[in-house]
Image: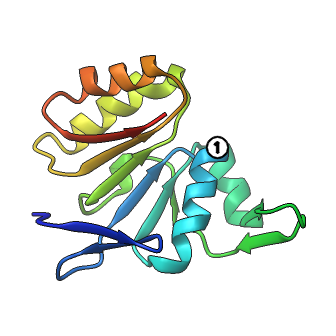
């Protein structure tokens, strides 16, 4: 059970443990969040659709992070194609999918972790998405950014 979470310089600290963090969605937001967190977390997992997952497995992640156009690579990406591949419940689930996938994503989280205490972080565009997350995952610990 998660008792306390602190974020210090992109490092998420859970008292007494290194958290498992799932980034659910490998689009622009999900891959960027994964790249930002990767230097600080070993237990970071990216969930991507099959075609995207295969491409990332082959090429890694490449992101331009500033105006200098310097390319930053992450070659070792811990990637899965289904939430059912998880052996343990993540302490943090970051949802970064498009709105047309949101209901299915929420249903898969509920099915896999029916009694979940995971912190759900919704990083998506639009108020409607946030309403959908709260509707689909009622009673869960949810934080959002729009």
The x and y percentages for residue 83 are 37, 47
Q: Quadrant of residue 111?
A: top left
**Quick one: 58 or 138, which is closer to the camera?**
138
Quadrant in which the N terminus is drawn: bottom left
Q: Quadrant of residue 75?
A: bottom right
Horizontal side, residue 143 vs residue 51: left or right: left
Judge whether 2 appears above or below 24 on screen.
below
Horizontal side, residue 109 vs residue 10: left or right: left
- Residue underneath mark 1: 27
Judge whether 37 appears above or below 132 on screen.
below
Which residue is located at x 26 percent, y 40 percent?
142
Judge whether 77 appears above or below 138 on screen.
below
| Residue furthest out toward the right | 68
The x and y percentages for residue 82 are 44, 46
Which residue is located at x 24 percent, y 63 percent?
88
**Quick one: 56 or 138, which is closer to the camera?**
138
Q: Quadrant of residue 90?
A: bottom left
Which residue is located at x 16 percent, y 67 percent?
4
- Secondary element type, mark 1: loop
């Amino acid at each position: 059970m998660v008792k306390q979470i602190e974020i210090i310089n992109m490092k998420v600290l859970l008292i007494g443990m290194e958290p498992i963090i799932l980034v659910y969605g490998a689009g622009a937001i999900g891959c960027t969040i994964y790249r930002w967190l990767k230097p600080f977390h070993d237990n970071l997992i990216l969930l991507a659709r099959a075609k995207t997952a295969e491409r990332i497995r082959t090429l890694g992640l490449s992101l331009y992070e500033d105006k200098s156009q310097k390319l930053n690579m992450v070659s070792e990406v811990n990637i899965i194609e289904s939430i059912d591949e998880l052996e343990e419940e993540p302490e943090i689930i970051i949802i970064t999918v498009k709105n047309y996938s949101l209901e299915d994503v929420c249903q898969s989280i509920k099915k896999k972790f029916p009694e979940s205490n995971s912190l759900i972080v919704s990083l998506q565009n639009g108020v409607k998405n946030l309403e959908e997350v709260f509707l689909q995952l009622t009673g869960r610990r949810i934080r959002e950014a729009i």
